[in-house]
Amino acid sequence: MRRRTERYPVSGTNSLWQLYKTVSFWKVIKIFIISQTARITPSFRVKNWLYRTFLNMKIGDYTAFALMVMVDAMFPERIKVGTNTIIGYNTTILAHEYLIQEYRLGDVIIGDDVMIGANCTILPGVIIGDRAVIGAGTVVHKDVESDTFVAGSPMRVIKRQNEQN
């Protein structure tokens, strides 16, 4: 399945060179300061407060962003994370892609009771279902169904909850 992204073509220079035509310089500065502060903050309550209050992210109760998690630097308001979810160390959650001839935006929706291992990258337009498990180092490039364990690069299904060993 193709990721749910909106595509915006550009002409001339590459889309990243045209960044400030798509998002305010001051918004990027604000997001940078808040997200860098949250990355090193040891308190889950403070991190979630920063994300909710200043970046307009939707974060469920008891969700834990581990140390050094990087949320989207331009469109964090397009990220929604459910309740009681763990986002592992140094994971990156992207809601944008700047390419040569276009840029893309897409909501990222992460369900309840999800476990995301360390050093993962979640691409824009992806939905991760409730109780999914994402193995460390995985690039999540498509949807992950509820109750499913995925891992690897490329990402593949390791096991579904209803499957026998």
Image (cartoon, helix red, strand yellow):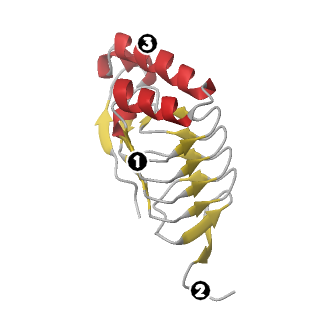
Is residue 121 toward the left or the right of residue 52 in the image? Answer: right
Q: Quadrant of the C terminus?
A: bottom right
Residue 34's place in the image compared with 86, above or below, is above
The local secondary structure at tag 2 comes to loop
The reply to whether the C-beta atoms of the residues labelled 2 and 1 are less than 8 Å apart is no
Residue 99's place in the image compared with 63, above or below, is above
Dot 3: few (<14), some (14–19), or many (≥20) neighbours within 10 Å? few
Q: Residue at x 41, y 64 (%)?
A: 1
Q: Nearer the viewer, residue 164 or 101?
A: 164
Image location (x, y in percent) of residue 23: 33, 20
Q: CA distance from mark 2 to mark 1?
A: 29 Å
Disc 3 target residue: 29
Is residue 55 toward the left or the right of residue 94 in the image? Answer: left
Image location (x, y in percent) of residue 154: 64, 59
Q: Look at the image and tell me whether residue 101 can be seen.
A: no
Disc 1 target residue: 60
Image location (x, y in percent) of residue 122: 53, 47
Residue 10 occupies quadrant: top left
Dot 2: few (<14), some (14–19), or many (≥20) neighbours within 10 Å? few
Looking at the rendered image, the disc whose residue lies closer to the viewer, 2 or 1, is 1
Q: CA distance from mark 3 to mark 2?
A: 47 Å
**Amino acid type shown at disc 2:** Glu
Dot 1: few (<14), some (14–19), or many (≥20) neighbours within 10 Å? some
Q: Nearer the viewer, residue 144 or 2?
A: 144
Q: CA distance from mark 3 to mark 1?
A: 25 Å
> On residue 163, which mark appears?
2
**Amino acid type shown at disc 3:** Ile
Residue 144's place in the image compared with 22, above or below, is below
**Amino acid type shown at disc 1:** Gly
Residue 6 occupies quadrant: top left
Q: Look at the image and tell me whether residue 128 can be seen.
A: yes
Looking at the rendered image, the disc whose residue lies closer to the viewer, 3 or 1, is 1
